[in-house]
Image (cartoon, grey):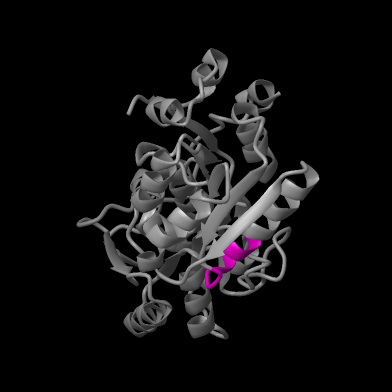
Amino acid sequence: MIRRTLLGLLTLTLAAPAWAQSPTPGRTYHVGFSQIVDHPALNATRQGFIDGLKEAGFIEGKNLKFDYLNAQGDVANARNIAEKFVADKVDLIAACTTPNAQAAIRLTKGTNMPVAFGCVTNPVESGVLTRIDQPTGTNVTGIYGIPPVTKMWDLLMELHPKAKMVGTIYNPAESNSLALNEANKAEAKRRGVAWAEIQISSSAEILAAARALAERADCLLMPQDNTVASAFDAIVVAARDNKLPLFSYDTSAVERGALAAYAQNQRQAGLDWAHEVAVPVLLGQNPGTLAPVAYKAFNLLLNKAAATAAGITLPPELMKAAVKVWDE
């Protein structure tokens, strides 16, 4: 049952690591943070990353220069950002999302400039790494999170057991979304549920895609897709207008109107990214000796108003298990 399987996984956290050393007195460390687009989930991860650096003694305005640049959803911009950080000779490129990681890795290949990626779903399938079970031996390491597909479908089927066709929208140019779509399609088949998908290339296409999908599917499940996140409100409108339950792998989507989400704790992911990857590198450890780190903290979030709009009553036990329940 969903109530039993989720309870033990919702609020896992890590104790702050005991660092063997502190930042060198009198030195200013330069971190270049590259992000593909501005939206709540990525912003929460970035804030967690900054907070994690601060906990380790790297403080903006004191001994840390933190350059944050946003690619505005443009992969070409991600490359330009990486080029700038290389030219600036930063101490670490922190690349948030797969396109930014891919750009940073290409621009620093064969160099000693450290790259620590984050906000990456599956680094192997996206070509960021060749394997995740050992150190890379290169200038690259990072933190990643493969979405909890089985748990998400447990949740979806618990709340909407009569689902016959589940629909999604995604941008195939985002390799993470492409991989997650295949995983969802396989899970739908395993459970005997039809899977409907609409591909988009920009946020301008999302409203029309959401309306078309709402005419076919009886339930919607959205990925952690940057393009989708940039216009998620349009999907919420289509779901509400058609009284469809809307689920998401993005926890920030629940506050915006999704019925439920089960995904990584974004701020904790940022903290772990800093604690376990960035800080050791800044303190002198070779990134090639650090094995990539998997996300460890996952959260369930619920929205009562969205559930009511879809004609669903949230079980009390499930609401108790959620880290937050939105009323509207």
- Tell whether 84 sits left or right of 247: left
Residue at the outermost front position: 215
Residues 321 and 210: in front is: 210
Residue shown at the point (52%, 79%) measured from the top left: 112
- Residue drawn where x is 32% and y is 60% of the image: 38
Side of 136 relative to 115 (left or right)? right
Q: Is residue 159 above or below residue 200?
A: above
Is residue 292 visible to the viewer in this orientation of the structure? no
Q: Which residues are magenta?
A: 172-179
Which residue, as the protein is rendered here, is positioned at the far left? 61
Residue 300 place in picture, x, y as percent: 52, 32
- Given residues 112 and 233, the one toward you in this image is 233
Q: Position of residue 326 (x, y in %)?
A: 37, 27
Which is more toward the observer, 136 or 20? 136
Magenta span contains residue 175: yes
Q: Main secondary structure of the magenta part?
A: helix
User: In what quadrant of the picture does the C terminus appear?
Assistant: top left
Please name whichever residue, 301 or 169, is drawn nearer the observer in this view of the structure. Answer: 169
Outermost residue, top side: 316
Is 216 covered by the magenta stretch? no
Instruction: Please give the name of the residue rendered at 61% of the width and 71% of the height, measured from the top-left corner.
Output: 128
Total numbered badges shown on the rendered structure: 0
Quadrant location, the N terminus: top right
Q: Position of residue 83 (x, y in %)?
A: 38, 84
Q: Position of residue 157 (x, y in %)?
A: 66, 33
Residue 205, can we see it? yes
In this picture, is 18 found above or below 210? above
